[in-house]
Amino acid sequence: MQFKIINLEYNQNSKLLFELFSRKNHAVFLDSSISAKFPETRFDIISFEPYKILTTFSEIKENINITNFKKTREDIPFYPGAIGFFSYEANDESFKINNSIENDLEFPLIQVGLYAFAIIIDHKKKLSYLIYDMDKISEFYPNNYIEELLNNISNITENKNNKRIKSEAKFIPDIDKEKYKEQFNEVKNLIKQGECYQINLTQRFTLKNFPFNEDFTSWDLYKKLNEINPAPFSAYLKLDNNNSIISLSPEKFIEIKDNIIKTKPIKGTIKRSNDKKQDELNKQELLNSKKDFAENTMITDLLRNDLNMCSQIGSVKVEKLCALETYPAVHHLVSTISAKNNNMHPVDVFKTCFPGGSITGAPKKRAIEIINNTETTRRNIYCGSIAYFSADGSMDSSITIRTLLQKDNNLYLWSGGGIVMKSELESEYSEVFAKIKKIIEAV
C-alpha cells in the first residue's frame, strides 16, 4: 500500500472545489464549516467515484486492513479508505431487535464507498493536497485518471453562489400534536415504571415535490443551508438514483486518533434569541437546568459504559461535562469522553457504540425497543452516522441530526429530543421545532 501526495493551491472556500465534482458518482464532501470557526473546524475532505460499495460492517472491516501501516505524514486525517453512511437501524441485528416499523423510504441500512483518493483541505495549516493509493488507482482507474483530475482542479473558478429557486412546498409533520402527546405520555409512563431513565422521541417531516432541476440541485440546497446553519460535522453525500444526504450536524460520534477513542454527546438544548440580553439569559437557563443536566449525565454514563467495552481498563475519562456550545439556531450542552483503544479494529469500536446513546436513551437496548414500539416511521439516516475509516486506523464520525434525506423531488427531515422524568410536554414539543427552525425557514 503506497500513497502519493500532490500539493494543490489552498482556497478557504472548499465548496468551489467540490462544485467541480458534485455530480460525480457517490461524491462526498465532509465539511467542517470554516466560515463559522468552530473548535472542531480544520479539515474538509472531498472524494468521488469509489471503486467498490460496501453494505455490511464485516465488509468494511475486511477492506480496511490497518496492520503494518506506516504514515507518510502525521497531520493527514484520512488515508484513502472508506467513507459512507449508517442508518440508525443498521445495528438492530446486534441488539437482537426485530424492527417492526416499515421501511417506507426503502433506504439502505449501510452504504459505504471504498475511495482510492481524496482531496484534503487543512484550514489550520492553509494547505490543500491530493492523496491517492497508487496501487488502487492503477488497478481500478484509467491510466490518465490522476492527470485528468488535476486538470479539472486547475479549472476552478469563483462562483457567486446566488442560485435560488421558489417553492410553495412545505414540511409537514408525519404526526400531529395529539399523536405526539400520546407518544410522550406513553414514554413518560414507561420511565415512571422504571423501564428506562430516558428516551429520545423523534418525528419525521415530509416535503413533497420540491422543484429540483439541472440548475438547482440538492448540492445547491446544501450550500444554502450550510451558509445559514453551519455546523462542524456538515456533510453532503450524493447517492445513486438521484438521492442525496444533506447533513448539518453539530455532533461528533466516535473518533479514533493515535489509538485514543473520543465521543462528544449533545444533550440539553435551548433556542437562540436575536436579542443579546435574552440570548445570554437563555444560556444561563440552560446551564442551570437540572432537567438538562440530568439528561446529559445519563447519556455520558451510558457512553462511558460503551467505551469501557472497547478500551483499556481504567482509561475512560470524562474530559468535559455539560459544557456550553453555541450554534446558529440553538445552544447545547456537550460532554467529552475519551479512552485508550484496547487494540480493537476501528469498525468494531464503531459498531460496539452504534447507535449513539444521545439519540436512543438509557439503558440503550431497552430504549431502542421502546422507540421501535412508539415511533411511527423509521429514522433511516436520522440519528445514524456519516463516517470515514482511514487506512491508517484513524476514523471520525458524526451523529446525523439536523439532516435531510433527498429522494428524487421529496425531502425528509427529522427532529426530536430526550424525554426524562422531569420533561414537560409543551417544552419538549417546542424543542423539536426549535432545532430545525432555520432549516425549515430556509427551504
Image (cartoon, helix red, strand yellow):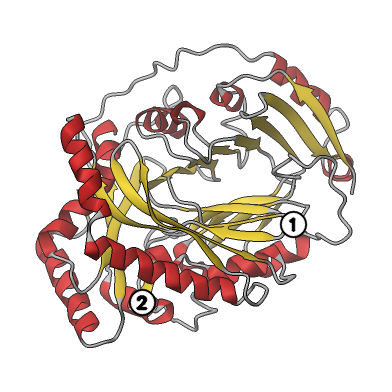
Question: How many discs appear?
Answer: 2
Near-viewer residue (165 or 258) = 258
Residue 283: quadrant of the picture: top left
Q: Which mark is residue 393?
A: 1
Near-viewer residue (148 or 132) = 132
Q: CA distance from mark 2 to mark 1?
A: 31 Å
What element does badge 1 sit on? Answer: loop
Residue 126 in percent (x, y) is at: 66, 24
Left or right: residue 1 compared with residue 58: right
Residue 52 in percent (x, y) is at: 72, 52
Specify the amino acid type for callout 1: Gly
Disc 1 packing (10 Å; few <14; some 14–19; many ≥20): many
Residue at 68 percent across and 67 percent down: it is: 341
Q: Which mark is residue 385?
A: none
Residue 77: quadrant of the picture: top right
- Look at the image and tell me whether residue 57 can be seen: no
Residue 44: quadrant of the picture: top right
Residue at 68 percent across and 74 percent down: it is: 312
Residue, disc 2: 367
Residue 83 in percent (x, y) is at: 64, 49
Residue at 41 percent across and 34 percent down: it is: 230
What element does badge 2 sit on? Answer: helix
Near-viewer residue (40 or 315) = 315
Is 111 rendered above or below residue 19? below
Residue at 78 percent across and 35 percent down: it is: 131
Specify the amino acid type for callout 2: Ala
- Look at the image and tell me whether residue 347 can be seen: yes
Disc 2 packing (10 Å; few <14; some 14–19; many ≥20): many
